[in-house]
Image: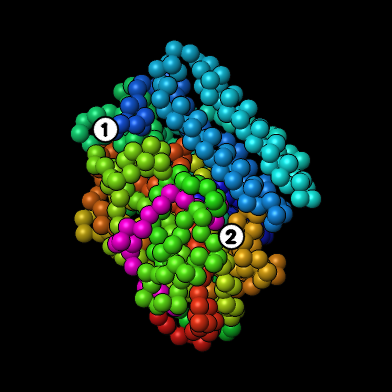
Amino acid sequence: MGRNTRKRRTPLATKAIAASAALALGGGGLIWANYYASAHETSNNAWGNQTKAAGAQVATISCPDVGQKLTNVPNQARNEVAGELANLDRQITDAYQRLATTRDAQTRDASFVQNSILQPLKDRRQAILDRIKLEITRVGGTAPGNLNVLASCTGTPANQTTAGGQQQNGGQQQTGDQQQGGQQQNGGQQQNGGQQQNGGEQQGGQQQGGQQQNIGGQAGNGPVAADFVDITKVQPNVAGKPQKSGNASTGTFTTRCGVNANKNHNTDNVIVAPGVTNGAHHLHDYVGNQKVNAFSSNNTFLQGGTSCQNGNDLSSYYWPVVRIQDGSQDFDQNADGGGKEGNVGKILTPVQAQIKYVGSPTSKVVAMPQFLRIITGDAKTTTNGLANANAHWSCTGFENKVQLTTQYPICPQGSKVVRTFAFQSCWDGQNIDSANHRTHVAFADANGNCQNGFKAIPQLTMRLVYDIAPPTVQNGQVKNAYAVDGFPEQLHKSATDHDDFISVTKNGLANKIANCINRGQNCA
């Protein structure tokens, strides 16, 4: 997924944040954002050849999110602008690769990162920003006046690569994060510890005070020990759901589309970067529609076939793959979006993938419009912050008690890892997409109401279950880590998890889903 924009915050949601902060201080860890107010929203490539880092190690490159500023791009310019935004992502990837392969030079020259990586990156970004402004004005639009200030990027030290929350290596998540009513506040820093690759080959970093200070991971760009927590040591943090009114839509509709056992993958993202190969810079699992890539269109979606049991469901459901970093390789070890961009290890197929549409606690729902696009979560939280995070990680047997956003769970023996998503459930009633891919949909407030004239639609929820041997953390190092695929500079943080959806149905299925939910039935 590409860069995401920050969502609106309502007064009710802001009050909910304050309330959640008080609760979380006593509980440790995150409070679950419920469905109705979810905020959250050894290789032959450079990644296998990390060397020692500078004393003040730059772990990643942080660039302002241009896409979030572009909320009024005319339709005639959207494809061109999307292509330029994809170019910005490609530039950051290239700069991060240079950062990762010049550690020796960085130790010898304190100004190397600024002069040889960040300044050239700024110049290249400025040229693209100028082209974006030209594309918008060429068709009669007005470009934001402050785009030029978004050209500069910064190098982020290893101990500042998490947007919020104090975390300790291998320990329990502390109370720097509070999440409630669909929103998460940023605070604190992460103490990044080192990590040893399976097989004993240690990745880049410098010994400081007896601990390895690096950015970890089998590919050298995460995850690290501090990204994991023993779920049995996290206090319960799941909040209750809003009270249902007499007009609630209480039904559910389940569509069974498989777990991508046929390995339908690509590294494109047709929503954010149409027409751009490898626009996602990481690998996706696809279920539902079987012909989705960067060059797909609404017409091709209708001809794509489906993995869903219900042949009328041609919708596309796709998410970044999860990999186990145990020293193994997969088919894309030397490919774009795979090992060439720091996404390494064995790709895991979910053992379960539940796709369910649910209703609103306060109103009936209207049918989803054909070709509606929704992105939930933010693939860039490591550098964007947590405002649009919508990652929820847990373990079977713990889902009703503990949900995590900024750490991956270490599950006890016999328990499986669970990823959960709850998509935006309010629609503006007019648009199937928006320039920033966010403003046409929204989350309900803490009480389950849609604001600003938005209409309630069936809320897409997804639950992905993985059979993963528990990683082990000892002395600030993690072995057999797992992580979600992502943009290389995002360091495989758990909060970068996200999910994508394009609604495509035929023979009246969209209306059947809405009617089932409004009648309070449980349909499949």
Are the residues flagged by discs 1 and 2 in contact, CB closer than 8 Å?
A: no
**What distance separates the C-alpha of mark 1 from that of mark 2?**
47 Å
- In magenta, the rendered stretch is 253-272
Label 2 CA crowd tier, 10 Å (few <14, some 14–19, many 20+): many
User: For this rendering, which residue is in front, 101 or 245?
Assistant: 101
Q: In this rendering, is residue 42 above or below 417?
A: above
Question: Dividing the picture into quarters, in which one does residue 223 lie?
Answer: top left
Q: Which residue lies at the image location 28% right of the left edge and 38% below the top edge?
A: 478
Q: Amino acid at mark 1?
A: Thr
- Looking at the rendered structure, the secondary structure element under dot 2 is helix
Compare marks 1 and 2 and give the one earlier in the sequence: 2
Residue linked to disc 1: 42
Disc ID at residue 365? none
Q: Does the magenta run of residues contain 268?
A: yes
Image side of residue 265 versus residue 96, left or right: left
Q: Is residue 401 above or below residue 142?
A: below
Residue 311 position (above or below residue 80): below
Residue at the image position 62 percent from the left and 61 percent from the top: 433
Quadrant of the snapshot with the C terminus: bottom left
Q: Residues within 10 Å of mark 1 (few under 14, many from 20)?
A: some
Q: Which residue is mark 2?
A: 16
Pinpoint residue 345: horizontal percent, then vertical percent: 29, 43
Residue 438 visible in the snapshot: yes
In the rendered structure, which amino acid carries the disc numbered 2? Ala
Q: Element type at marker 1?
A: loop
- Viewer-proximal residue among 15 and 55: 55
| Residue 312 image point, x, y percent | 45, 77
